[in-house]
Image: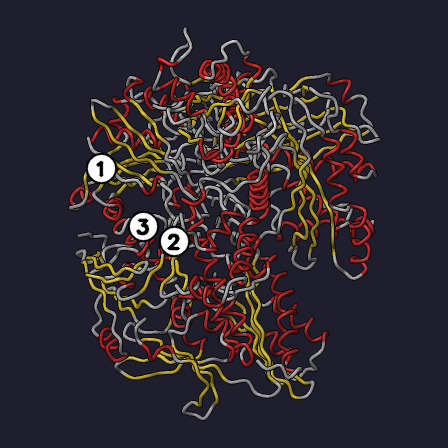
Amino acid sequence: MIDSGRATVTETARSVEVRVNGTVVRHEVPLRLLLVDFLRDILGLTGTHVGCSVEGRCGACTVLLNGESVKSCLMLAVQADGQDVVTIEGLGRPDALHPIQEAFWREHGLQCGFCTPGMIISAYQLLKRNPCPSEMEIRAGLSGNLCRCTGYVHIVHAVERASEALQAMTPEERQRWLAL
Amino acid sequence: MSVTKVGQARWVGRAIPRREDPKLLTGKGNYIGDMSLPGMAYVHIVRSTEAHARIRQIDVDKALRLPGTVAVILGPEMAERMEPLLVPSIIPNLGGELQVPHIYPLAIDEVHYVGEPVAAVVAESKYEAEDAAEQIEITYEPLPRVLDPEEALAPEAPKVYRDWKNNVLWHGVIGGGDRDAAFSRADYVFRERFYGHRTGTLPMETRGVVASYDPFSGLTVYGNTQRPHILRMGLAEILRLPHDKVRAIAPREVGGAFGTKAPLYREEVLVSYLAMRLGRPVKWIETRLESLMVTGQERDQIHELEVAVRADGRILGIRDRMVADVGAGDIGVYLGFVMAWCGGAYLTNAYDIPYAEIDLTCVATHKPSLTPSRAFGEFPARFAMDYAMHLIARDLGLDPRQVYERNLICNFPFVSPTGITHDSGDYGGAFRRLIEAIDYDAIKEEQKRARAEGRYIGVGFSVGAEVSGFSSQLFVPLENQPGYGAATVKIDAHGMVHVCEGDSPQGQGHETTLSQVVADELGVEPSDVYLSYGDSLTTPFASGTLGNRGASYTFSAAVLACRRLRPKIYRIAAHLMGMDEAAEEEFSLENRHVVWRRDPNRRIPLKEVASAAILGPTRLPPGVEPGLEASAYFEPTIAGMWSIGVHGVVVEVERETGAYRILRYVVVDDSGCPINPLVVRGQIHGGVVMGIGNTRYEAFRFDAEGRPLATTLMEYTMPSAADVPEIEVIEHNVPTPYTPLGSKGKGEGVPGPVPAAIASAITDAVGNPRFRLCQLPLTPEAVWRAWQKAEAESTRLAGA
Amino acid sequence: MYPRPIAEYKAPVRLPECLELLAEHRPETRVLAGGQSLVPLLKRRAVSAQTIVDINRVQELSTLAEGVTEDGQRVLRLGALTRHRTLAEHPLLGTRYPALAEAAASIGDVQVRNRGTIGGSLVQADPGADLPVVLAALGATVRLRSLRGERVLDLEALILDAGKTACDADELVIEVDVPSPRRGEGAAYLKHCDVFHIGVVNLAAFVRLDGEQIEDVRIVVGGVSGRPLRVAAAEQLLLGRQADAHAIAEASDRIGEAFLLPEDIRGSAPYRRALLRAGGARVLTRALARAKGGEQG
C-alpha cells in the first residue's frame, strides 16, 4: 500500500502468459511491473539492459514484440499478455550466432557490450524492413540506441556486413534468420 | 608440420575478433545489474533537492510504515561508526594549498549540492524502495549558495564548507622556465579567455554496488569500479575493518567507465555500511537521473591564456590563469581537482614551449564534484591551446600549418616546463601525414568555389599528446597510488596459461589483447590463455584500468612475467628431453612446444613441462622448485611515456542557423605497436565521437537555484549514430623504446583534440577575421551568435 | 524509477467497453495507447494510475483509409491507434499526404514510432510534438467519443496548453480526419533539431494556389508555446499574393517576429527567431513547390 497524497492503492497482481523466445511462460506479475523487469528479474533474461531511467532514450532494453522493436522499459509487463517477445537470448547462441551477431563480432561492433543486445535487436529490425540499407539509413535506423564506446563506426560496418551476408543466402535461409 | 620462425610475432599486431564477444553478443555477460544474492534488499538513495541548505527535519515515519520497507538510515549515526570519507590514502599529494571536505556517506545537518545523498531507504524490492523514498519528508532551510567559480572566490561569497577558510579547494602554480626570455622577446602576445564547459563521459551502464557482510569472511563488495584494490583499501580504512575482512570485486563485465568509475564514491561506502548495519546483502543501482546529477561531470575550466610568440609563429612561452569549478570536491582519490591539475600540467601539449606558468585555482561551488572523464582534465586545455594556435596564425598572417610545424616537439626525450616527460615519437611526421590525408590544399580550393555559391566549407586540425599510463613518479603525487603495472602468469597443469592482472577492464578487450601478448611470449594460442581480473583477493595489487595503463604498463608486466618464467621452462624441458647440458638460449617456445632451435625436431609439449612442474615434481631436474609461475611489476625507466594523435576535420556551416555538418573526420594516430589494430581503431572511433558529443551536443547545465537542467538523456543529449560521421583512422606507429613490445596505451586521451579541430574548421569556414569561438560547447547557436557578432564588428569597423 | 502501484488493468477489445470504463469516472484512470509518453510519466511518478485502460486491443481504432465525412468532405481517416511508423511509411501517405508522413518520420526513433500512436500524441499535447503542428496546418479534425455522444474538434479547439486538451475524462479520441488534398494544394513539415529528433522549433505550412496566386494558407509553429500556434500575420501577408521568393522572404520574417519566444536549454529567443525565419522560408518553399508541381500534399 502506498499513500502519496492520493487514495490508498493496493498493489495488484495478474497472471500473464507470454511467449518469450519461443517458449510460453506464465507468471503472476504486479500490474506496475515494467516489461524489462519481467524479463530480467523474473525470467532471468539479463541480456536486456537498462541504461536510462524514465525517458527510454538509451535503447539498451530493446526487444521484439510481435516482431517489432520496442523499448521494454516503456511497457508494462501486463501489456505483453498473449504476445510474442524475443530478446537477445532468442536471436542466436554463443555457439550458433545469428548472422547479425556474427557480423558484430567480426567487425568489432562492440566494446563493453552493454548497449549491444539492444543495438543488435535494432539492427535486426532494420534489416528485416530494409535488407540493403545505405550508411545513412543504417545510422538513422540505429538512432534509438546509444553507444558510448564504439563511436558507431564498427557498428555501421557490422550492419553492412550482416546485410551482405543475408543477401548472399538463399531466400529460404534468409527468411529463417529474419522470421522472428 | 610447419614451424613458425623463431622470434616471429604471431599474435601481436593481428586484428583478430575478440574472445569475449560471443558472450556479450548473446546477452550472457554478467554486469553488476545482473547480480543478486540470497536475501538481498534494495537501496534507494534520497538526495538533496537544495544546492545549499540546513537540514531541519527528516520525517521517516510514513516510509517505515510501508510493508516493504526494511530500514531508513540517516547521516548522523555514521559519524560515530566510521572515519570521515576522505581518508589519507585517497587524498592526492600534489603540494600546493589543499582543503579537504569533512564528509560522511550521507549528509549530516547540511547539504552542499543538489544530489548529495541524504537518506538511504532499504526495502524488499526496488519498486518498494522507491515507494518508501517518496514518503520521506525533508525540511530544508535554504542557505546562500554560490554556483559560479569566480564569484566563489570573492571574500564575501558564501562558503561551500563552513570549516574552510575560503572556497579554494586547491591552489598552486605549475610550470617553469625563463619568464623574461619568453615574454620580453616576443613579437606578439596573444591573449584570450577560453572556457571548457561542464560535460563528461557518462557510460551506458550507470554505477552499481552489491555488498554483503558476515563477521567471518567480512565485507564483500561487488561494484563496477575501475580500481578494486583501491576500493578495498579505502573501505577497510573508512569502515575500520582489517584488510583481510574486505574484498572488492569488479564484475567480469563492466558497461564502460571512461574514468567515471575510478573514484571512491560516497555510495560505495554507504552501501557497504548498510550491508554491515543490516546484516543482509544489499544492492544499489544508480538511476540515470542520479548519474546525471552526480556522476561524469568534468571539464569546467576557465583559461585566461597568454601566449608569447615570435613573428614566425614560434611560441616562446605561455601564461595561464586557470580557474576550475570543481563543485563540492567530495569524491575520493580525486577530490574533483586532480583533473584540473592535469589540464594545467598538460597544457603545453605536444609543443616545445620553453616557458610556462600556470596559476591554477580549483574552486568549490554548490554543485556536484567533478569526476574524472576520458581526456582527463585536458579536454578544455587542448581546446584552449590548440585553438589559440589557429587564432595566433590568423593574427600573424601565417598559415596555421606553419605555427604547428614550428612548435611540435622533435627531440626526445623531452621534458616540458610543467615537468611532463615525452619519451619518443614522430610528432611532426604524424602531423604532416594528417595534412596530406585530409588533402588540405584541395579543400582550400574547394572552399573558394563553395563560397562563390554561398556555401561555407572549412578545414581544421589539432593535436593531442596522450598519456601512455602514469609512471609512479607522476602517479604517487597525483593520486597517491603506484603507477606500475602488475601481473602474475601461471602455467597450469594442462599447459594453459592463467594470467592475473592487477587492473580491471570495462570493455577494453583484455581477454583478447592480453592473451595475444602472452600467447606470443609463451608460444601458445590466445585460446590457451585465461584471465583473472577485478578481484582484490586473487589478483596482484595495482591501481586499476585507467589512463591508458593497459598496453603500456600492465601488459608489459605480463610480458616480463612470461620472460621471467621462460628460463625455468627451458631448464625443465631440457631435462625432460635429456639435454641438461643445453643452454637456455638454445630453446624457444612455439606452437605449444619447447623447441630446440638448433634442431626444431627436438621439441617437447609445454603441457608436458607443466605437468612435470606441477603434477610430477619427481621428474624435475635436481634443485628446481616445482610450479610454473611468476609475477612482475613494470615501471619504465623514464618518467613519462606519451603518444600522439592528430585530428583533421572538414565542416560545412550554414549561415542562417549556425548548423554545421562534419564532412570528414580523419585521425592520424600512434599506438607504438598496436597489439590488436581492430581494438585500437575502436578506441579511436569511440574517443572521437565522445569528443564530438562533448564539444557540440552535451552539457551539464544548472538553473539559478543550482538544480540540474539535464535530468534525462533527452536533455543530456549524447550523439546517436545518426548524429556523427564515419571516422577515418591512419596508423602512424612509432614503437617506444621504454616498453618491452614498444606498445603504448591508447584511447583515454582521444577526445582531447576534438574541440579545437572543430572550432578551427568552423572558423576557417566562416572566414571572417573577427570570428572566434572561445567557449564550449560549440552548439549551432553558439556558432550563429559568434557569426552575428563578428559581422556586427566588421560592419562597425567598416563604418568607422 | 518505477510506477506507483496500479490497482486495475483493463484491456477491452471493443470500443463501447472502453467508453463504459471511462464513463465510470474512477479516480486516476489513464488510457494507455502506445505508452511512449504515458509510461515515462508513470515512471517519473509525475502521474499515477489506479486504473489503466489499455486500448491496444481495440481493432476499430486502427483504421487507415480515405473516405467521406458526414458533410461530404473527402478525408483520410486515421484511427486513434494508428502508429507513427504507419504514418511515416504507408504508401498512401507518402504519395498523398507527404507532410504528414514527414512529420511522423521525424518523431523519436524506430522503437518509439513502432509503438507511439496519433491519438496518444494529440492527447499528451507535448508542446514540441510533431503531429499536432502538421495536423493543424492540414486542417485536420479530431473525433472524440463518449457514452454521451460524439463531437468533432479542430486542433486549435482540442489542444489548450502544454499537456492540456479539451478531451474530457470520459472521452476518447477515436479518429483524426485529414482533408484530402485537392488540385493546387501543397503542404510541408520541418523540424529544426541539432541532435537526434529533439526539436528546437517545428513548422508546417499548407497552401492553396489559384494559378500563381495564394488563395489559402495556414502556417503553424510548434515548440514556441504550450500549443501549436497559427502565424496569422504571415498568413495575412501571403493571402492573395503571387507565390514568389519575395513573398516567402517577407512571410518568413513575420514568422520570426510573430511571437514572444521562450528561452530554454535548446535555444535562446533570438536564436529561435532565426530558426523560425530560416525554417519558415524552407517550409513555405516546399509547400509551394508541392502545390505547383502537381506533387500533392
Mark 1 vs mark 2: tell me if same chain: no
Q: Amino acid at mark 2?
A: Ile
Q: How is the image coloured?
A: secondary structure
Chain letter of disc 1 in the image? B
Seen in the picture, residue A91 relative to B407 is either above or below; the reply is below
Considering depth in this image, is B532 or A59 the residue closer to the camera? B532
The disc at residue B72 is 1
Q: For marks 2 and 3, give the CA distance.
A: 9 Å
Percent coordinates x, y for residue B36 in the rendering: 27, 40
Amino acid found under the numbered disc labelled 3: Leu
Q: Which residue lies under the disc numbered 2?
A: A88
- Residue at the image position 20 percent from the left and 52 percent from the top: A3
The reply to whether label 1 and label 3 mark residues of one chain is no
Q: Quadrant of residue C41?
A: bottom left
Please tell me whether residue B249 is drawn above or below residue A22 in the rendered image: above
Q: Secondary structure at mark 3?
A: loop
Between disc 1 and disc 2, the foreground one is: 2
Name the residue carrying label 3. A45
Residues at discs 2 and 3 in contact (Cβ within 8 Å): no
Residue placed at 43% from the left, 43% from the top?
A: B292
x then y, percent, for residue B409: 73, 26
Instruction: Identify which residue, C117 or A132, lies in the foreground.
Output: A132
SS for tag 2?
helix
B589, C167: nearer the viewer: B589
Can the viewer see residue B301?
no
Q: Report in which chain the residue with disc 2 lies.
A: A
* CA distance for labels 1 and 3: 31 Å
